[in-house]
């Protein structure tokens, strides 16, 4: 069955380290999204992509970057992790319409 | 003013009752409306979407949309303890495939 996966599911890192969170989908969806979810803030969009080589900033993109070299993957990189980036990160994809399907999430702790 | 607003709850209803979850949005250009269910520690799961004014029913769930009032709701009939979760309202259609999420309403169904 087609699906969307994220890895790792849990990550503990130290302030200042570079961290990459993986997102892989097998639906062949063009659109992919990264969100973070924090208490009191709901889901906030970090970056998104409408296809290979396309990336766009969302509302909370500072300190994060993405790259899209193929349809299936949109890795999220924290260039220099900060404690404020401790959060749960969700990847989602859609086929061009508005309906988005979410991965299982990555819980990131920055110490 | 938040773009998508929901009462955070918690909303508590007895088993078998109707649960009513509400959402308002600010962008009159919005065209698509979604309800996601999120169990604690899990990712958002799509349960309903609606594009046209009126009601849309799927099993025990009914989504209601009133574009003139910029209001969308979700009714859950015969509520079960397994319906206890956070329900996220999401709005799209004027953001190029992006969704704007409300902060979610926590629903608790008491046996």
Image (cartoon, rainbow, N blue to C red):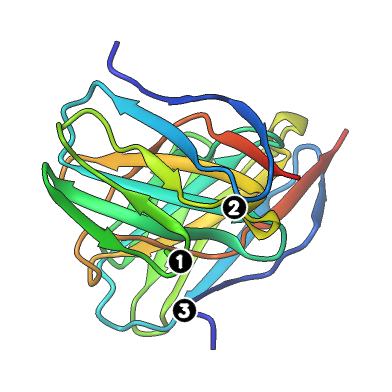
Q: Secondary structure at mark 1?
A: loop
Q: Secondary structure at mark 3?
A: loop
**Residue at x-position 60% and y-position 41%:** B38
Can you identify the residue that label 1 sits on? Answer: A62
Badge 1 and badge 2 in a common chain:
yes
Count residues near mark 2 (Cα–Cα under 10 Å), then give few for <14, some for 14-19, many for 20+.
some
Q: Residue furthest left?
A: A52
User: In the rendered image, which quarter is residue A85 located in?
Assistant: bottom right
Work out which quarter of the rendered image holds the C terminus of chain B and state it.
top right
Mark nearer the viewer, 3 or 2: 2
Can you identify the residue that label 3 sits on? Answer: B3
Read off the chain for label 1.
A
Question: With B111 as the anchor, is B84 left or right in this view?
Answer: left
Please, is residue A14 above or below residue B42 in the view?
A: below
Q: Residue furthest bottom?
A: B1
**Residue at x-position 67% and y-position 60%:** A84
Q: Please name whichever residue, A21 or B104, is drawn nearer the observer in this view of the structure.
A: A21
Q: Position of residue A15 (x, y in %)?
A: 67, 49
Q: Residue furthest right?
A: B111
Read off the chain for label 2.
A
Do callouts 3 and 2 mark residues in contact (Cβ within 8 Å)?
no
Read off the chain for label 3.
B
**Residue at x-position 52% and y-position 40%:** B44
């Amino acid at each position: 069955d087609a699906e969307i996966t994220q890895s790792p599911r849990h990550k503990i890192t130290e302030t200042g380290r570079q961290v990459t969170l993986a997102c892989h989908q097998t639906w062949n969806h063009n659109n992919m999204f990264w969100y973070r979810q924090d208490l009191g803030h709901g889901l906030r969009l970090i970056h998104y992509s409408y296809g290979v080589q396309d990336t766009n900033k969302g509302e909370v993109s500072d300190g994060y970057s993405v790259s899209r070299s193929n349809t299936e993957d949109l890795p999220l990189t924290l260039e220099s992790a900060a404690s404020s980036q401790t959060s749960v990160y969700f990847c989602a994809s859609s086929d061009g319409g508005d309906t988005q399907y979410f991965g299982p999430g990555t819980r990131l702790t920055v110490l | 003013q938040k773009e998508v607003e929901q009462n955070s709850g918690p909303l508590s209803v007895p088993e078998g009752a109707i649960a009513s979850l509400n959402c308002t949005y600010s962008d009159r250009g919005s065209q698509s409306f979604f309800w996601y269910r999120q169990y604690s520690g899990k990712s958002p799961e799509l349960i309903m979407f609606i594009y046209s004014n009126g009601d849309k029913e799927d099993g025990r769930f009914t989504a209601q949309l009133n574009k003139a009032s910029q209001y969308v709701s979700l009714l859950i009939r015969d509520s079960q303890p397994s319906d206890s979760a956070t329900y996220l309202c999401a709005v799209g259609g004027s953001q190029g495939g992006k969704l704007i999420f409300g902060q979610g309403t926590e629903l608790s169904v008491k046996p």
